[in-house]
Image (cartoon, rainbow, N blue to C red):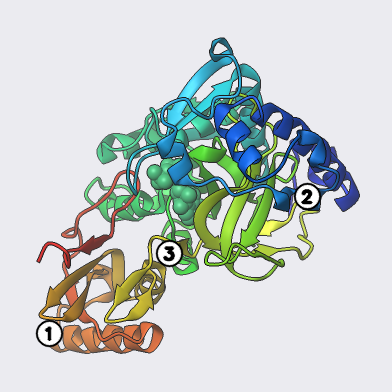
Amino acid sequence: MQINFWNKQIETASRDEINDIQLRRLKNIVKQAYKSEFYKKKFHKAGIESPEDIKTLEDIQKFPFTTKNDLRQNYPAGLLASDFDDVVRIHSSSGTTGVPTVIYLSGEDMDCWTDLVARSLVATGCTKSDVFQNMMTYGLFTGGLGLHYGAERVGMAVLPIGGGNTIRQVRYMQDFNTTTLHITPSYLLHIYGKLDDFNTKIEDLSLKRAITGAEPHTEQTRKKLEELYNMPCYNSYGLSEMNGPGVAFECVYRNGMHIWEDGFIAEIINPETGEVLPDGEKGELVLTNLTRTAMPLLRYRTRDLCHIYDSDCPCGRTHRRLSRIMGRTDDMMIINGVNVFPSQIEEVVMNIPEVGTNYQIVLTKKGAIDKLIVKVEIYSKMFSGDASQLDSLNRKICEELKASIFVNPVVQIHEPGTLPTFEGKAKRVIDMREEI
Ligand code: ADP
Ligand code: K
């Protein structure tokens, strides 16, 4: 397998070298954070008198966590740590779970971010010969612009097309021989169902890979996409609070996402107790941005549930890897007292070959009883149109779901192309229990 590096020295640095970089940068960033009103107060309250209190990497545990609520309460500029004149970019999160939060970047911060994204793209095999169709939303959302600058830095030919307008997307893929897509997994699933309508076959396209991210998706969904499109799909993780994409990225081996540890310190905690967990244990990811000077964020609670692998990767990169995100702490549904993550449902339905490219989860209430409705689209190529086949498929999905989530669902099978589709982040769970 061909393995390319953007910065081989850093990407393959020894653990001691990575620790040295992290400690040096942590000291700097703590010093910088003290310049913001927010952290000065927060550190004081936690009894940390000076940035000099940091002697080892473990000392990071003396610092309190920063939460999304902290960002909201200090909207819009309470966490700004540098002169406003140094700010060259303002981004905000997409606000999936409430009031958006704001992030400030200086020119230097932009440069660091862009470099990490370039490194990430090269890790998936991208080169300057590639054509990069960026199908993520441009604007305040970091997904579009974040990858854009990194791809240009690699020297790829970038098509800043943004999300939506599927017919134009497919046409541009053909006209410009696009090799690399950047897209949400749900939109990539959706497009597949449209190719027939446009008389386009995968073989007519020059696609070599897709970079998929911005929303939780399971290994089953990745497998389905890779089979449908006959190309690898690389998982990309980031969040606006840590700049955006380019925090952790898969290499050509696609066995977890290398966390760029010269840029971030990653910890996994027990979300209930805050206790730091060892590698391999599942919990909430906490990230410290080591280089962002305009708005440092220390020990930020991402609410994303995952674990860290420390095993060696055959690509030679030494930066530890992040598992697939299994859900967010605030994603969890409680259905008649049973905890269920949407990803558990996705895992089951996407693994069933007769199920097509879309699904939806609806929660309602009848009296005191919660009802879980799982709607799936059928995959037309696997289906003969026979009613008894539908019945047995329905039973099969019910049984497999029941076995996995311990809740009895109602399964509804829909025709291809009839469930709501998404051009950006998908919203698949409709909880109507409170409204009833
Ligand atoms: P918002 O919190 O408003 O959605 P962002 O646009 O910054 O804000 O989205 C970041 C979040 O998106 C992450 O915290 C994570 O929950 C999700 N996310 C991003 N990339 C991935 C990925 N590859 N897999 C799963 N979830 C992801
Ligand atoms: K080029």
Other residues around mark 2 within 10 Å, as few (<14) / some (14–19) / many (≥20): few
The answer for how far apart the CA atoms under marks 2 and 3 are is 39 Å
Q: Quadrant of residue 270?
A: bottom right
Q: Amino acid at mark 2?
A: Asp
Mark 2: which secondary structure? helix
Q: Is residue 42 left or right of residue 186?
A: right
Residue 246: percent from left, percent from top: 59, 40
Compare residues 175 and 368 and report the one nearer the observer.
368
- Identify the residue at image location x=24%, y=82%: 409
Instruction: Kindly tell me whether mark 1's CB lies below 8 Å from ligand 1.
Output: no
| Viewer can see residue 141 | yes
- Identify the residue at image location x=59%, y=69%: 282
- Quadrant, the C terminus: bottom left
Other residues around mark 3 within 10 Å, as few (<14) / some (14–19) / many (≥20): many
Q: Quadrant of residue 281?
A: bottom right
- Identify the residue at image location x=33%, y=44%: 424
Q: Which residue is mark 2?
A: 59
Q: Which mark is residue 221?
A: 3
Residue 435: percent from left, percent from top: 12, 62
Which label's residue is closer to the chain start, 2 or 1? 2
Other residues around mark 1 within 10 Å, as few (<14) / some (14–19) / many (≥20): few
Q: Which mark is residue 309?
A: none
Mark 3: which secondary structure? helix
Residue 207: percent from left, percent from top: 48, 45
Is the C-beta separation of discs 2 and 3 under 8 Å?
no
- Quadrant, the N terminus: bottom right
Which label's residue is closer to the chain start, 1 or 3? 3
Q: Which mark is residue 387?
A: 1
Examine the rendered structure and indicate whether residue 207 appears above or below residue 326.
above
